[in-house]
Amino acid sequence: MKRTCSIVFCLFILILFSGCLSRQDNGNETEAAEYLGIELTPVSEQGNNAIKGTQFIDKDAYRLRIDGMVERPANLTYDQITTYTPVSKVVTLNCVEGWSFTAKWTGVPLKKLFDDTGIGENVTTVIFYSTDGYSTSHGLDYLIDNNIMLAYRINDITLSQDRGFPLQLVAEGKYGYKWAKWIDHIELVNASYKGYWESRGYNNKGDFGGPPFE
């Protein structure tokens, strides 16, 4: 009886401390609970919005098109994108609805992609299009100066379909509606552009802490 109780107690302790190390096992991937001493919000507890529900994208058929005012238009596969040297950063997404979450994002800086495509003269704006018809834009200088990335991992696990697989824009310092998901097209232009929510009255800059509406 004592031996049985000891075994049960040991199993309890093992499970308890395992929960401190990780929160979710996604196949062969384990979700990180913290990074650089910063506690991360579990994916299961993160807010999530979409205009047409979850998009389901075939990784093998997926292509990221980069065009507009570029010197060398690109049509990148998922594998090509993930072969770039990745960067990781903890960034908080703040929604205009009042909720937020903090996550470790891993992906490729847009600057690396633009170094390969080349940037045309007088480009001011970058437009991001999603498979569900969503779109938003950012100033080129903001993207480059802040080393903004396209993330394909969150808390050390691959983005799931409902989280924006294959790519989500990590628009640091901006409200959540500027964080496009399911991105399949990036266009560089020299004019302003109002995306899905911006054309419906939301502030086109979308700076967190600033006015959400124009």
Image (tube, rainbow, N blue to C red):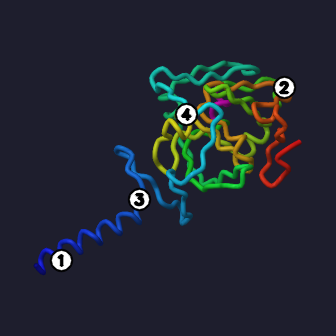
Q: Where is residue 30 in the image (x, y as percent from the top left)?
A: 40, 51
Dot label at residue 190: 2
Range shown magenta: 112-116
Residue 47 in picture, x, y percent from top left: 60, 49
Residue placed under numbered mark 1 in the picture: 6
Q: In this view, does 199 lie to the left or right of 131?
A: right
**Mark identifier at residue 22:** 3
In which image quadrant can residue 23 be found?
A: bottom left
Relative horizontal placement of residue 51, taking residue 140 as reference (left or right): left
Residue type of the residue flagged with mark 4: Thr
Q: Residues within 10 Å of mark 4 (few under 14, many from 20)?
A: some
Q: Which numbered disc, 1 or 4, marks the residue that appears first in the sequence? A: 1
Observer-nearest residue: 64 or 42?
42
Image quarter where the C terminus lies is top right
Q: Give the crowd class for mark 2: few <14, some 14-19, many >=20 residues within 10 Å.
A: some
Judge left or right: residue 93 versus residue 63.
right
Q: Residue 121 carries which label?
A: none
* Cα distance between the residues tagged 1 and 4: 46 Å
- Element marked by disc 3: strand
For the N terminus, the image quarter is: bottom left
* Closer mark to the observer between disc 3 and disc 2: 3
Q: Where is residue 116 in the image (x, y as percent from the top left)?
A: 63, 27
Residue type highlighted by circle 1? Ser
| First-in-chain label (1 vs 2) | 1
**In percent of the image, x 74 and y 47: which residue is there?**
174
Q: Report the Cα–Cα distance between label 4 and label 2.
A: 32 Å
Is label 3 or label 4 in front? 4
Q: Which residue lies furthest to the right in this view?
A: 214
| For marks 3 and 4 on the same chain, the one whose residue lies earlier in the sequence | 3
When asked about the image quadrant of residue 191, the answer is top right
Disc 1: CA contacts within 10 A as few (<14), some (14-19) or many (>=20) = few
